[in-house]
Image: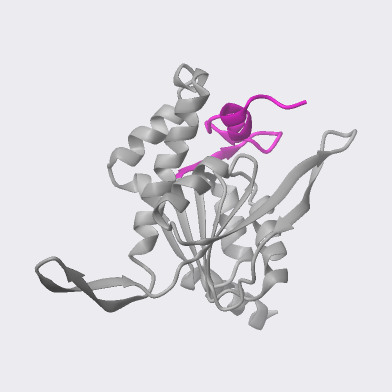
C-alpha cells in the first residue's frame, strides 16, 4: 500500500499543469465571451472563439517541443532558423472538440490527426456511463500527442479516450488541452494519468452539479457550436 501511495504521489508531482487564465491575456476575453449567454446566441462566434483558443494553446505548447537548426536560403543570403523536429498527432473528442482541434491544426499544420467519439449513456435512474464508440488514428508510438476537448467535467471521458488512443501505441509525451475544467476533473486526471503528460487548461471552475456539468461553466459546448441534438 505504501509503494502504491508513493507511485500516486509521484504522478501528481511530475505532471505539469498550465492554466492560461492565471495570467491576463486575450485568452481571458475569449473565455468571457464563450460563457456569456448573449454572445452564445451566435454559433459562428462561439466556434471561432474556441478555434482562437486552440491557436493560443498551440503556441504555448510549441515552446515545449524539440527544435533543430536549419539553414534557410533568402534572396540575399542564408539565415539560421530553429524549426520543430517533429509534428505532433492532434487528437480530439467528437463533436465539441472540432473547433478547438481546428485551432491547434492551424498552427501545427503538418500534424497527423486522430478522432474519437465518446458520449454519456444515461440510465433510467439518471446516472450515466461514458462510452467510447469510434477511433480513427495513426500510430502514436513514440510520438507527441495533443488530445483536446473543450470541457473537462468529471475527467472520465478524457481518461477513457486517452486509454483508447493507447491501442495505437505508446506516446513519448501527451499534452491534454481543455478550455474549461472542474477542480474534481483536474484531480481525477492527476491521479489517473502518468508523469509524461502535461495539462494545458483555460480556466478551472470549482463545482460540478448533480448532472456532472461544470458550474458556472458555459453549458453544452457541442450544442452551442453545432446546434442541439435529440
Left/right placement of residue 141 relative to residue 119 reads left
Residue 28 position, x and y percent, is 35, 38
Image quadrant in which the N terminus is located: bottom right
227 within the magenta span: yes
Judged from this view, the residue extending furthest toward the left is 76
Left/right placement of residue 99 relative to residue 25 reads right
Task: Choose between 136 and 37: the one closer to the eye.
Answer: 136
- Who's the residue at 61% across and 29% down the image? 226
In the picture shown, does residue 112 fall above or below 44? Answer: below
Residue numbers of the magenta segment:
203-230
Q: Looking at the rendering, which quadrant does residue 194 occupy?
A: bottom right
Residue 184 position, x and y percent, is 59, 49
- Who's the residue at 41% across and 28% down the image? 33
Residue 220 position, x and y percent, is 62, 31
- Who's the residue at 72% across and 27% down the image? 229
30 within the magenta span: no
In the picture shown, does residue 194 fall above or below 56? Answer: below
Judged from this view, the residue extending furthest toward the right is 124
Amino acid at each position: 500500500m505504501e509503494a502504491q501511495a508513493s507511485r500516486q504521489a509521484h504522478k501528481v508531482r511530475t505532471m505539469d499543469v498550465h492554466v492560461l487564465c492565471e495570467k491576463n491575456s486575450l485568452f481571458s476575453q475569449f473565455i468571457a465571451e464563450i460563457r456569456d449567454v448573449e454572445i452564445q446566441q451566435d454559433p459562428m462566434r462561439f466556434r471561432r472563439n474556441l478555434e482562437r483558443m486552440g491557436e493560443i494553446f498551440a503556441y504555448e505548447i510549441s515552446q515545449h517541443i524539440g527544435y533543430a537548426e536549419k539553414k534557410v536560403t533568402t534572396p540575399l543570403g542564408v539565415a539560421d532558423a530553429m524549426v520543430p523536429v517533429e509534428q505532433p498527432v492532434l487528437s480530439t473528442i467528437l463533436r465539441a472538440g472540432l473547433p478547438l482541434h481546428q485551432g491547434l491544426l492551424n498552427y501545427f499544420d503538418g500534424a497527423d490527426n486522430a478522432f474519437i467519439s465518446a458520449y454519456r449513456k444515461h440510465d433510467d435512474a439518471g446516472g450515466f456511463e461514458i462510452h467510447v464508440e469510434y477511433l480513427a488514428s495513426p500510430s502514436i508510438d513514440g510520438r507527441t500527442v495533443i488530445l483536446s476537448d473543450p470541457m473537462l467535467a468529471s475527467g472520465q471521458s478524457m481518461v477513457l479516450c486517452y486509454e483508447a488512443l493507447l491501442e495505437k501505441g505508446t506516446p513519448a509525451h501527451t499534452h491534454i488541452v481543455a478550455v474549461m475544467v472542474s477542480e474534481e476533473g483536474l484531480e481525477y486526471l492527476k491521479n489517473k494519468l502518468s508523469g509524461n503528460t502535461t495539462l494545458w487548461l483555460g480556466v478551472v471552475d470549482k463545482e460540478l452539479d448533480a448532472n456532472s456539468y461544470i458550474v458556472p461553466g458555459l453549458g453544452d459546448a457541442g450544442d452551442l457550436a453545432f446546434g442541439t441534438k435529440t
